[in-house]
Amino acid sequence: MRADPSFVEQIRRDLRDVQWPAPEEIRSRARRRSQRRIVVATVVLSLVGASAVAVAAPRQSSAPAPPAASPTRHEITTDALLQPSDLPRPVDVRLSQSGLGEMIRLEDNLGYCRTSQGLSEGWQPSILSRSQTFVPRRAPAIQTRGEGEATQELFRLVPEAATQLFAGLDDLIAPCAEWRSVGPMDTAGVISTVSAVHRWAVTQRGFAGDDAAILRDSLTAAQDVKTGQKYGDDPEPLRLAVVRVGDLVSVLRLGYDGTEAELVRLAVAAAARMCVAANPAC
């Protein structure tokens, strides 16, 4: 079918009226369009790049993300305790125990000093604990911890209670800075009432772990209350070390021949061992 003549004629007139640009102008316009496309593409890429930088590298004023929290440790594993190699002489481990909710009884005599004056013992409760006694290698069996070469009690506490134990040490021993104890003593089958003066003091602090202290009980020889007779010389002071690493607290004692310097060295070794089980981690 032929096209409508009027329609064809109209197309011809329109095409005749179109002003076609010269070839140079066409090439110039093409160059400008290409440049415009390049500029637009560059701007878009710049914006995308800026967004990527903004996401990948926050502004310096932004707070850094907190580090991932370490998992909370609960059990006290055996590698958190002192090892035989930490002691200066060959030893074996005897009387190893564990418990739940034990009180941290620093020293029975210190507790008795307080209760005899109408005060509470002042002990802190623990969540769980482990204890061990070291004896000389191949030594005969022992019945009490006091017979050992060294003893360690390791406790896990609520973190606030662990910190408070050290903050309250001075108040704990203050009533016993000079305390006279009175009690019976058996001498060759003869029971006498004797007295002795105990002087409790903190002699060193801050030498191991997060907190550390040496407690010393210097006491006089027993003296007969009625006759005034003294029984021997003043004994060696009783010493114990208390060390904290995070939420762990260790109480350490040496045998009768142990010195304060040896006790400090043992406390430093204990603090290093406690790191593997402490919250927060060392």
Image: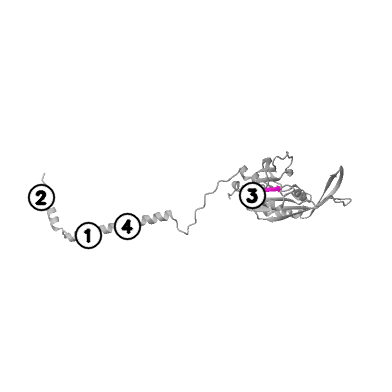
Amino acid at dot 3: Ala
State the residue position of label 3: 269
* Residue 108, above or below 26: above
The mark nearer the N terminus, 3 or 2, is: 2
Sequence order check, earlier mark of 2 and 4: 2
Mark pair 3, 1: CA separation: 84 Å
In the image, residue 163 lies in the stretch drawn in magenta: no
Q: Disc 1 designates what residue?
A: 29
Real-space Cα separation, disc 3 to disc 2, in angstroms: 111 Å
Give percent across and percent down for residue 135. 70, 42
Q: Secondary structure at mark 3?
A: helix
Q: Who's the residue at 23% across and 59% down the image?
A: 31
Left-right relation of 66 to 237: left
Q: Residues within 10 Å of mark 3 (few under 14, many from 20)?
A: some
| Tag shown at residue 42 | 4
Residue extent of the magenta highlight: 247-253
- The answer to whether one can see residue 193 in this image is yes
Q: CA distance from mark 4 to mark 1?
A: 20 Å
Crowd class of label 4 (few under 14; some 14 to 19; many from 20; radius 10 Å)? few
Q: Amino acid at mark 4?
A: Thr
| Position in image of residue 176 (x %, y %) | 76, 53
Q: Measure the C-alpha gap from mark 3 to mark 4.
A: 64 Å
Mark 2 or mark 4, whichever is nearer to me:
4
**Is disc 3 in contact with disc 2, using a CB cutoff of under 8 Å?**
no
| Circle 1: element type | helix
Instruction: State left or right for residue 1 relative to residue 226.
Output: left
The numbered mark at residue 5 is: 2
Residue 252 highlighted magenta (yes or no):
yes
Type of amino acid under label 2: Pro
Which of pointers 3 and 1 indicates the residue nearer the eye?
3
Residue at 69% across / 48% down in the picture? 252
| Nearer to us in this view, 19 or 155 | 155
